[in-house]
Image (spheres, helix red, strand yellow):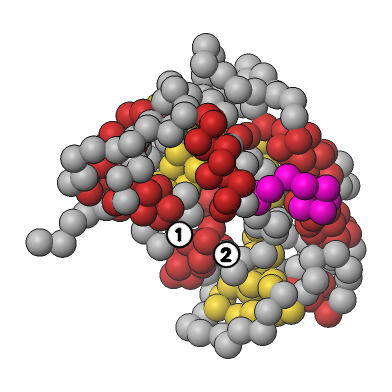
Amino acid sequence: MQKIVIAGGNGFLGNILTENLKSTVGYIVVLTRRNKTPYENIHFVKWDGKTLSDWVKQIDGCDVLINLSGRSVDCRYNPKNRAEILDSRINSTKVLGKAVKQSLNPPKIWINSSTATIYRHSMDKKMDETTGELGHGFSVEVAKAWEEAFFSCNTPKTRKVALRTSIVLGKEGGALLPIKNLAKMGFGGKQGNGNQFVSWIHEKDFAKSVQFIINNDNIYGPINIVAPEPTTNAVLMKKIRSKLRVPFGIPMNPVLLEIGARIVKTETELILKSRNVIPKALLDAGFIHDYGNLELALDNLLEQKS
């Protein structure tokens, strides 16, 4: 590959991808709202995520387009934030679709973010791409509209994949850092009843999944980006406490969680929804996770310095 374009690539997932893909490509262009200095083979181009402008030139002739744009869902779901969450996803997807459509040499593949939250709260069934059941509620409706905007774009020369990504566990960002800090303060007990499933993936396997998808022409449509087996909230918190050598963790019931969520301006749904999702399509295609075991993943991410 000569060129990858990553829209909205300045966040946690964008940084993971640029660092893991930069050695496989001539150069990477990151579409961003902020001015940044280029380094190595990483270049930055300004865009606003909703209107066509000079950035469109970067799409024509690129090998791979990856869209990670979207306002964080780690906030209170008031009307203003709900509108920003939805609009940031739909607008960026639609304007990229226009750019791809008008390209003389469109990208071979367009990978667009989605979310494993699109499936219903499930304690009884593992959700795969074929038999998984979609849910209801604000987050699910955003995910449905996001995928509809993506797949409705008429781009016949470009293979399209929607990444239904779960919680990505990383060393420098994502969900693991606040969980680790809570555990260190003694609040690393189960959240709610602790039985809700947690679908997760190691940051290295997230990047490896994307590269695998790029290199396999038979993969298209919605793809679950998760580890092979979900864990539960109680097991996850217990293992994190063990790795950090924290002897106890105060459990957080739903009432305490709601109080805490209001204080830090987030929603309890992010913690209490049971995401019971498996990566059937990737496994069927031959993908092998390097950190598919939770114990192994946490050993790598939470290694203690002696």
Q: Nearer the viewer, residue 106 or 205?
A: 205
Q: Quadrant of residue 304?
A: bottom left
Q: Quadrant of residue 105?
A: bottom right
> Could you say whether the residue bearing mark 1 is in a helix, strand or loop?
loop
Relative to 60, is 251 above or below?
above
Q: Amino acid at mark 2?
A: Gly
Task: Say which residue appears at 89% left-offset and 63% top-offset.
Answer: 102
Q: Amino acid at mark 1?
A: Gly
Residue 74 visible to the viewer: no
Q: Quadrant of residue 170?
A: bottom left
Tag shown at residue 190: none
Q: Tell me the CA gap for discs 2 and 1.
A: 9 Å
Say which label, 2 or 1, has the lower sequence index: 2
The N terminus - image quarter? bottom right
Q: Could you say where residue 53 lies in the image, as x and y percent from the top left?
A: 87, 76
In magenta, the rendered stretch is 73-83
Q: Which residue is mark 2?
A: 11
Q: Which residue is mark 1?
A: 173
Q: Nearer the viewer, residue 167 or 132?
A: 167
Image position of 106 (left or right of 123): right
Image position of 222 (left or right of 53): left
Task: Say which residue appears at 57% left-offset and 64% top-offset.
Answer: 11
Confirm or deny contact between disc 2 and disc 1 (CB under 8 A): yes
Q: Nearer the viewer, residue 263 or 14?
A: 263
Residue 265 visible to the viewer: yes
Q: Could you say where residue 8 lies in the image, as x and y percent from the top left?
A: 67, 65
Task: Say which residue appears at 76% left-offset and 35% top-offset.
Answer: 138
User: How many C-alpha atoms fall within 10 Å of the one at disc 1: few (<14), some, or many (≥20)?
Assistant: some
